[in-house]
Amino acid sequence: MSVNLEFENRLWEMADKLRGNIQPSDYKDVVLGLIFLKYISDSFEEKYNELVTEGDGFEEDRDAYAEDNIFFVPPSARWNFIKKSAKQSTIGQIIDEAMIAIERENKSLKGVLPKNYARPELDKAKLGELIDLFSFNLGSKEARTQDILGRVYEYFLGKFGSSEGEFYTPPSIVKLLVGMIEPYKGRVYDPCCGSGGMFVQSARFVEEHQGRRDDIYIYGQEYTAATWKLCKMNLAIRGIDGNLGDRDADTFGNDLHKKLRADYILANPPFNISDYTLIQDDARWKYGIPPKNNANYAWIQHIISKLSPRGVAGFVLANGSMSTSTKAEAEIRKNIIEAPNGGLVDCIVTMPPNLFYNVTIPVCLWFLSKKRENRKDRILFIDARRMGTMMTRKHRELSDEEIAKIYDTYHNWRDSNVENEKLMVAEKAEPYQLHNYEKKEIKEYKDILGFCKSASIEEVREHEYILTPGRYVGIENFEEDREPFDEKMTRLTTELAEMFAKAHKLEEEIKERLGEIGYEF
């Protein structure tokens, strides 16, 4: 049993016809809500038939489903009933009532499912055609084994991401973040969790490394109500139990997990927010009060405040975060780098352009760690700007081999000076293991010109605490210039912006010192 890309494309094309004059954000809820309904109905129907075959009369017993983590679906919400009603003009109302009935029977879904199918602007004939098209089984054991639901759901999320781009982090970036910090066991937190992609990939990582899904504990928070609901559905269809709070909330103004100290933090915060809730005397601003007009360093400090004593974090930021020279941000960056016990910054990776849908701003990945004994006073810089393949004129993707090259480089650097025997002893004593060293082969790390460099804190001081990898890794020797023009211009303009910022800072210092001796201008 399989769903090939051709079918997924056809499903998307059919669903896209449904859009009409519906806003993209509402349209997303319509389609993904329908996929969710099909999934839980299929899972229920399979279990229902098993119970009927057993002949003990438990097929309508809700507890018989709960013990297998299957949602109970009342008769009016089962897919057979929905499909029989697909050609009726009241199909929208029938689906809304089905969603209400499911929420009534399953308290964890209360207030989560979309209930807007009866609206006049939604073409009921096309809605019925879309229901007919959902002929494959999404929730059977066989389908769950092959993760057909996950493939369809992620495919649709990706397609919505290409049209909206606000709530979806590209899979290659999520895979890289998870591969870098290796969340084998412990508390996983995302302070701006969007549709839950970080959590899904973390659970997948655990299973791929022979772990159990319940080895990790999910905590998240999301600001936008519709996206919070989407995340709840995304986790539910994967069977992932997560604490996302009672509802959507502002992470800065209303932290839903004040006492949480996480072993792993994964995040893709919104870039360069110019208006956010800044509480001046907040305990999170340990390294300096972030500026009101940019939340990047507020996100960094919030993430640090949530790390456990052995915690690690990986998150996405705009490239400007590595080199900003505004007084508040430069001071915070310096204090984080110079933090006691060897600093908190573990690794910085610059990414190639065009990885995000509809977001052209260059991005980088930050990795922070609370435990850096074997690499104290050093930071790994990786320049991955030349990686990836353009899949369309506007979108680039990293291959699995390229992702592995980046995280293997980091792991080899991180672990190369550590003795395996000591690690395994320490690992058994820790309630949450950070890395599964018993299964991992540690290789010698080496600097690679133009790609990676293990720099000392002293080198970083000499560069005025600027964290742009291009300053440290050097330039690879090429027989000819093969760098695409657009990528070269992105790199050169980024470096030029840094030079302008530095020149402006020097200009202000000169004016200030001249003023001190009476020569103001």
Image: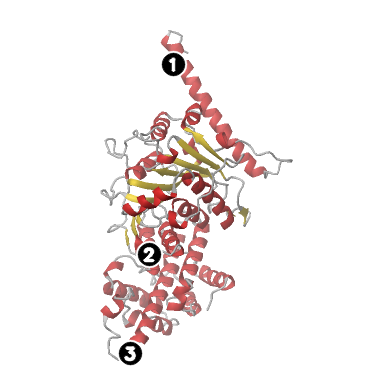
> Front-most of 361 and 13?
361
Q: Is residue 302 left or right of residue 463?
A: left
Q: Earlier in the sequence, mark 2 or mark 1?
A: 2
Could you say whether the residue bearing mark 3 is in a helix, strand or loop?
helix
Name the amino acid type tagged 3.
Answer: Glu
- Image coordinates for residue 38, horizontal then vertical, percent: 42, 76
Residue on which disc 2 sits: 213
Could you say whether the residue bearing mark 1 is in a helix, strand or loop?
helix
Q: CA distance from mark 3 to mark 2?
A: 29 Å
Tag shown at residue 451: none
Q: Residues within 10 Å of mark 2 (few under 14, many from 20)?
A: some
- Mark 3 vs 1: CB contact within 8 A: no
Q: How many marks?
A: 3
Residue ranking furthest to the right = 479
- Image coordinates for residue 143, horizontal then vertical, percent: 46, 76
Residue ranking furthest to the front = 421
Q: Earlier in the sequence, mark 3 or mark 1?
A: 3
Tag shown at residue 54: 3
Residue sitting at x 31%, y 74%: 102
Res. 202 in view: yes
Could you say whether the residue bearing mark 2 is in a helix, strand or loop?
helix
Residue 182 location, quadrant: bottom left
- Mark 2 vs 1: CB contact within 8 A: no
Name the amino acid type tagged 2.
Answer: Arg
Residue sitting at x 41%, y 53%: 435
- Mark 3 vs 2: CB contact within 8 A: no
Q: Nearer the viewer, mark 3 or mark 1?
A: 3
Compared with residue 211, is residue 472 higher up or lower down, i.e. above or below?
A: above
> Front-most of 377 and 493?
377
Residue on which disc 1 sits: 512
Residue ranking furthest to the top = 518
